[in-house]
Image: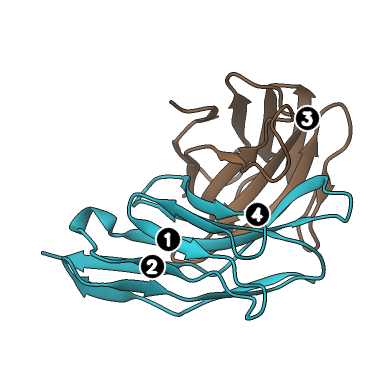
Amino acid sequence: GNSVTQMEGPVTLSEEAFLTINCTYTATGYPSLFWYVQYPGEGLQLLLKATKADDKGSNKGFEATYRKETTSFHLEKGSVQVSDSAVYFCALREEDAGGTSYGKLTFGQGTILTVHP
Amino acid sequence: GAVVSQHPSWVICKSGTSVKIECRSLDFQATTMFWYRQFPKQSLMLMATSNEGSKATYEQGVEKDKFLINHASLTLSTLTVTSAHPEDSSFYICSSKDVRQGLAQPQHFGDGTRLSIL
């Protein structure tokens, strides 16, 4: 079956530090990959996505590149802010060979990020 | 703005009560909706897939008689936690996908419902 593994947290950084959250996956087909962010007490928001190998997703200064050879989708940001404090989830969605998405997401365990001033 | 509305956002009730959670797609048709459960400081676990006009598909280990799902229209799915007990306390999140969008477009998530059973 599909699985997603994220680096264990929590991650604590000072403002303007560089952020990396590792994510690796296993999938039998051609997954799309996502990063979601969850702020305290809220639901999930899509942060960025990539649908095929070598695609780079980016949003709000965050980036992640779909690496098929290493089955990874690591999240990076060059300079974090206090407002980036949240839980980050890596997820994959399997697309079948015909490209029709069933839609079921498989999530990683989440990584808590805390940024101090 | 929000494209999936989930209601209520927070509910506290006594043990034995049944609780209904609604998930609405606001400006698109959702033939499929997903219900997730999240325990504190843990990831989201898919509970069931709700299909409009047919029975929901439950994940292994999820009691279908405990968590009743109804998806009677293209814009509304409901999750009813029947005879809720303290161990059912959790954060429940729904999501859906606009079927008109292209392949590999992301799902839209509701803001979640925090259920606390006393």
Q: Chain of mark 2?
A: A
Q: Residues within 10 Å of mark 4 (few under 14, many from 20)?
A: many
Label 1: which secondary element: strand
Residue named by callout 1: A63
**Amino acid at the residue labelled 4:** Thr
Label 4: which secondary element: loop
In the rendered image, residue B14, in percent from the top left (x then y), is placed at 50, 43
Q: CA distance from mark 3 to mark 2?
A: 35 Å
**Dot 3 and dot 4 residues touching (CB under 8 Å):** no
**Amino acid at the residue labelled 1:** Glu
Q: CA distance from mark 1 to mark 2?
A: 5 Å
Q: Residue at x 59, y 18 (%)?
A: B27
Residue named by callout 4: A51
Same chain check for tags 3 and 4: no
Q: Colour of chain B?
A: brown
**Dot 1 and dot 3 residues touching (CB under 8 Å):** no
In the rendered image, residue B75, in percent from the top left (x then y), is placed at 68, 21
Label 2: which secondary element: strand
Residue B40, picture quadrant: bottom left
Q: Mark on residue A76? A: 2
Task: Reply above or below: B100 against A90.
Answer: above
Q: CA distance from mark 4 to mark 1?
A: 14 Å
Residue B15 vs residue A51, the one in the foreground: A51
* Earlier sequence position, callout 4 versus callout 1: 4
Q: Nearer the viewer, mark 3 or mark 4?
A: 4
Residue A12, picture quadrant: bottom left
